[in-house]
Amino acid sequence: MRRAREARFWLFDACFPLWSEKGSGDGGLFREGLTLDHSPMPEDTTRVRVQARQTFVFAQAAMLGWKPDTAMEDVEQGVRILSGLARRPDGLTGHRIHCDGSGLADVTPDLYDLAFALYALANASMVVQDGGSVLASARALMDAAEARLKDRTNGGYAEHLPPPQIRSQNPHMHLLEAFLALHVADPEGGYLDKAAKLILLFETKFTAGPGNLLGETFKADWSEPDGDAAMVVEPGHQFEWVWLLDLYSKLSGDALHPAAGRLYSFATGTLDSAGRTLLEVKRDGSVHNGGRRTWGQTEALQAHLMMLRLTGEESFAAAACTSFDILMDEHLTPEGGWIDYIDENGKTLSQFMPASTGYHVVLAFADLIQTMEA
């Protein structure tokens, strides 16, 4: 309970005010980030995924009850961007937008950006007055993705156009997250069936390598990559899939996928002595990159919370508290920002505060508040 109160206080009194007041530029777009002293940075372009993630942040703020009028203005700003400036003539999202609001600076379609645009629109539809029009915008974007990006030979979707020769699980993981959110917002929209196809891809391709752990990159046909790419995995993503599999189980009514326990056990076995999530390890558990990012700690927190809800065991509550304390003590600032990247020796590597990190923190803290206060 204490940590749930701390999380709510930090969100309401620090994070949401900081990013609402300083996180938008003169052109009406969300900023790419702030300096390490929490000041706006000069920038010419910003990524579509930042517009999407910040839209989600303020939709979550509205759901939690933070300044409804202010939060709603920020959500509506994000919806306008994602349904307008961010779109190409063919209906897909581009990659970067001019900060003056003049249009796309990089029109390259990117599945990662698109997944977050869908996710943001799903969440925004639950808080704005005209949620139906927001869902229609999401449907149009999904239709464009089905027409232009769907890989009908190998499964999944092209990460870019033209289709790359190196495939990635990461954007597909976030596309699953988007489909699940869209299913909640639009239960008759067919999104759960799309999610099931990504679960099958996860089962047959993403976790087909040694130890049946989650791989990161693959060849064009989703077969195992060459060299170190086949052996290096990211504990943070193992954790992320754990709670996504649980969410899919709850929404679909299917049993929890057995991979959830396997990935959780492996990832927890790679935590350092203080309980921190490291950036990269090898499939044998040895450290490949001992640095740590904010998002890795948030994914561990959510995985621990999922295991707590599943079992009620105190050990998982203790693990969640450890992850929360690491975030508060080492990554998050009292003013509502974050130190995003720390090396294996504890040295700060961050040059600024990326706005995109807020999605991870807000999502995990909302989960913590819901779980601990319940």
Image (cartoon, helix red, strand yellow):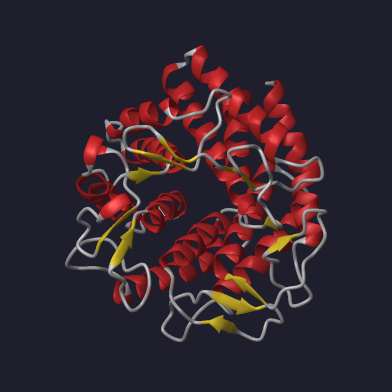
Where does the C terminus fall, quadrant-wise? Answer: top right
The image position of residue 139, as x and y in percent, is: 42, 68
Which quadrant holds residue 220? Answer: bottom left
Left-right relation of 142 to 47:
left
Left-right relation of 328 to 22:
left
Q: Vertical placement of 140 versus 266: above or below?
A: below
Viewer-proximal residue, 127 or 344? Answer: 344
Which residue occupies 31% across, 32% down?
256
Which residue occupies 27% across, 61% down?
156
Q: How many labels does the image show?
A: 0
Where does the N terminus fall, quadrant-wise? Answer: top right
The image position of residue 72, as x and y in percent, is: 71, 58
The image position of residue 282, as x and y in percent, is: 36, 39
Which residue is farthest left? 153
Q: Vertical placement of 90 versus 360: above or below?
A: below
Left-right relation of 374 to 23:
left
The image position of residue 306, as x and y in percent, is: 46, 29
Which residue is farthest top? 314
Residue 128, visible in the rendered structure: no
Q: Vertical placement of 166 versus 188: above or below?
A: below
Residue 78, visible in the rendered structure: yes
Which residue occupies 77% across, 46% down?
336
